[in-house]
Amino acid sequence: GKAFNQKGALQTHMIKHTGEKPHPCAFCPAAFSQKGNLQSHIQRVHSEVKNGPMYNCTECSCIFKSLGSLNTHISKMHVSATQNTTNSTTDTAHITTVTF
């Protein structure tokens, strides 16, 4: 078996086997097994440019720091919605200022 010398290391390891994701993102439906992964996700996807323009998805509550990230999200998560409209995804983006 595997030995763990830190108090929370076994619990963190066991989450890999259960698939539990107890750290949800406040800005999109993503959830993570480890807090550090959540923090990396938020920095990478949502808040690298603090207090800068943010792009809201009009189909759900997701928020992104770049238009490219929003467009990727829409194409992956809302494909049927984008196929049924003649507007480009840039026409549906809303810019918001978010403070962290």
Image (tube, grey):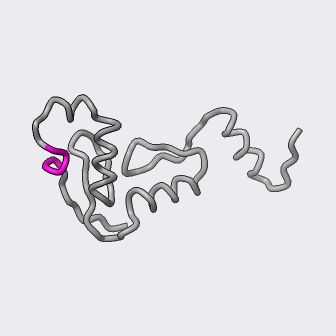
Q: Is residue 32 magenta?
A: no
Q: Is residue 62 left or right of residue 83?
A: right
Eyeballing the image, is 4 above or below 46? above
Q: Quadrant of the N terminus?
A: top right
In this picture, is 67 found above or below 32? below
Q: Using residue 39 as the reference point, say whether residue 11 is left or right of it.
A: right
- For the residue pair 54 and 83, the one nearer the viewer reads as 83
Which quadrant does the C terminus fall into?
bottom left
Residue at image position (28%, 47%) is: 71
- Across and down, in percent, residue 45 comes to 41, 56
Q: Which residues are magenta?
A: 88-92
Residue 62 horizontal/vertical position (percent): 32, 47
Tell me the residue at 60%/50% (across/down).
34
Question: Horizontal and vertical percent for residue 57?
Answer: 25, 46
Work out whether 91 lies above or below 42: above
Q: Nearer the viewer, residue 56 or 98?
A: 56
In the picture, measured across the screen, residue 60 lies left or right of residue 94, that is right
In screen coordinates, is 48 left or right of 40?
A: left
Magenta span: predominant SS is: helix
Q: Quadrant of residue 47?
A: bottom left
Q: Residue at x 79, y 53 (%)?
A: 7
Q: How many numbered marks appear?
A: 0
Q: Position of residue 14 (x, y in %)?
A: 72, 39
